[in-house]
């Protein structure tokens, strides 16, 4: 007997396992957040990370899009951030309004690695995240599965060395090209925390997982092979072993999203993930051909389509679903990246309705 309510909609789990489904499941990256007026109401003037750390508030925000678009979204994703791993490793991270994340003391030279915690006690450092997941899973009452997630090692190295968002990647590139050995050391430390964090999210109630390699496209193919892929592979191979140790026997699907790394699709299809999430630079039919049924694909509408007319959205949804082979197998609908704060929720509702209509045909 599970300690959680019975799941009423398992469409995304079936699609991730490669089963034939009645229509493609849908969720949207950053489906919770600033484009929803109710997000601002609940968040008020609170600090972003304070919001994540409050289980009641985080669970409410996580469920907001599920309620707002009642019955149209097939998964909830826990309201948190990829930067909680650097925090657990001992780094300070602030979320500055209209600027984004800022690290007051980024890692700028190899000796800065000494400031990181060595054996991170993930259960203790991120206990609030596990509480938020358990509470959200209960409050969801089985409406849809709850997704957990983490940042991929290379993407977190970028934030930890740059100290925030960047266009040049000056420091992150200095690390990999000049401090190569120490970069691998850092990537390994992050990987170890990521595996434990994902495993404990499952123990807490997460039913599917996603790893965000949002800065994948900043690496060329050779560097992706050296600084991203080996760590993504470690995560997918070590996670099931750790889950087994923790007494979890069911198979928990896991997705990898390597934004911009179009050249790596072939390898990503063979890297131990159940689902590969695509940005909008892919022609769906090309991706289907490369994947060749090995994994399920997720994506890949340009989020900017939401600024177009309803007719344009319908046309683009139709083309996308047909490009992915009709969507009745090996496909999960999503955007190619996250929502923007200025998007009109009514446009998103239209998008979701059209996905249901066209996906059911
Ligand atoms: C790179 C990355 C981050 N965070 C995340 C990624 C990977 C996905 C991607 O590529 O976009 C992942 C993330 N961040 C957030 C979620 C929650 C769940 C959801 O998607 O609905 C998830 C899955 C909430 C958030 N994370 C953040 C917000 C906005 C903060 C606010 O409300 O003040 C939200 C809702 C802040 C954040 N967090 C991050 C940045 C760069 C920023 C600032 C930029 C921005 O404002 O969009 C790092």
Image (tube, rainbow, N blue to C red):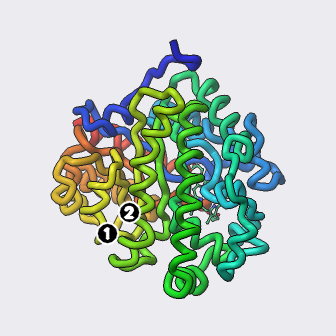
Disc 2 packing (10 Å; few <14; some 14–19; many ≥20): many
**Picture coordinates of residue 282, whole percent (x, y):** 29, 65
Coordinates of residue 288 in the picture (x, y in percent): 20, 55
Total marks in image: 2
Which corner quadrant of the image does residue 60 belong to? top right
* Mark 1 crowdedness (10 Å alpha carbons): few <14, some 14-19, many ≥20: some
| Residue 284 in the figure: left or right of residue 338 | left
Rendered-image quadrant of the C terminus: top left
- Residue identifier under label 2: 279
Residue under the image location 76 percent in, 47 percent down: 51
Per the image, label 1 sits on a secondary structure element best described as: helix
Q: Does the rendering let one see residue 358?
A: yes
Q: Are marks 2 and 1 in contact (CB under 8 Å)?
A: yes
State left or right for residue 59 relative to residue 97. left
Q: Which mark is residue 262?
A: 1
Residue 356 at x, y = what percent?
Answer: 34, 38
Residue at image coords 40%, 77%: 223
**Outermost residue, top direction?**
1
* Image height of 245 relative to 306, above or below: above
Query: At 75% across and 45% down in the image, what residue appears?
Result: 53
Left or right for 290, reference 240? left
Label 2 or label 1, whichever lies nearer to me, is 1
| Observer able to see residue 313 | no
Q: Position of residue 246 (x, y in %)?
A: 54, 31
Of callouts 2 and 1, the N-terminal one: 1
Q: Which mark is residue 287?
A: none
Q: Secondary structure at mark 2?
A: loop
Could you tell me which residue is drawn at 64 percent across and 30 percent down? 134
């Amino acid at each position: 007997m599970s300690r959680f309510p019975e799941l009423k909609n398992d469409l995304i789990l079936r699609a991730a396992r490669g089963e034939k489904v009645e229509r493609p499941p849908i969720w949207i990256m950053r489906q919770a957040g600033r484009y929803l007026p109710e997000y601002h109401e609940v968040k008020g003037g609170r600090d972003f990370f304070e919001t994540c750390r409050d289980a009641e508030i985080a669970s409410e925000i996580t469920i907001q899009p599920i309620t707002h678009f009642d019955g149209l979204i097939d998964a909830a994703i826990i309201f948190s951030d990829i930067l909680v791993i650097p925090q657990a490793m001992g780094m300070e991270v602030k979320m500055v309004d209209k600027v984004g994340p800022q690290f007051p003391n980024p890692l700028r030279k190899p000796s800065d690695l000494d400031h990181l915690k060595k054996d991170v006690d993930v259960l203790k450092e991120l206990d609030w995240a596990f509480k938020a997941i358990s509470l959200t899973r209960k409050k969801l009452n089985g409406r849809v599965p709850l997704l957990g997630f983490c940042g991929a090692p290379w993407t977190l190295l970028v934030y930890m060395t740059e100290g925030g968002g960047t266009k040049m990647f000056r420091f992150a590139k200095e690390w990999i090209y000049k401090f190569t050995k120490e970069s691998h050391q850092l990537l390994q430390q992050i990987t170890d925390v990521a595996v434990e964090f994902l495993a404990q999210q499952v123990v807490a109630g997460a039913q599917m997982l996603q790893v965000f390699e949002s800065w994948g496209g900043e690496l060329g193919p050779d560097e992706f092979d050296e600084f991203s892929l080996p760590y993504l592979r470690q995560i997918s191979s070590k996670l099931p072993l750790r889950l087994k140790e923790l007494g979890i026997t069911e198979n928990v699907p896991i997705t990898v999203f390597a934004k911009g790394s179009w050249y790596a699709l072939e390898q990503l299809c063979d890297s131990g993930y159940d689902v590969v999430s695509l940005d909008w630079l892919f022609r769906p039919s090309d991706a289907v051909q490369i994947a060749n049924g090995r994994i399920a694909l997720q994506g890949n509408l340009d989020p900017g389509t939401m600024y177009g007319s309803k007719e344009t959205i319908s046309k683009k949804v139709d083309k996308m679903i047909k490009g992915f082979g009709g969507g009745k197998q090996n496909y999960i609908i999503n955007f190619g990246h996250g929502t923007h704060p200025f998007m009109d929720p009514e446009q998103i509702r239209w998008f979701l309705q059209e996905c249901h209509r066209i996906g059911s045909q």
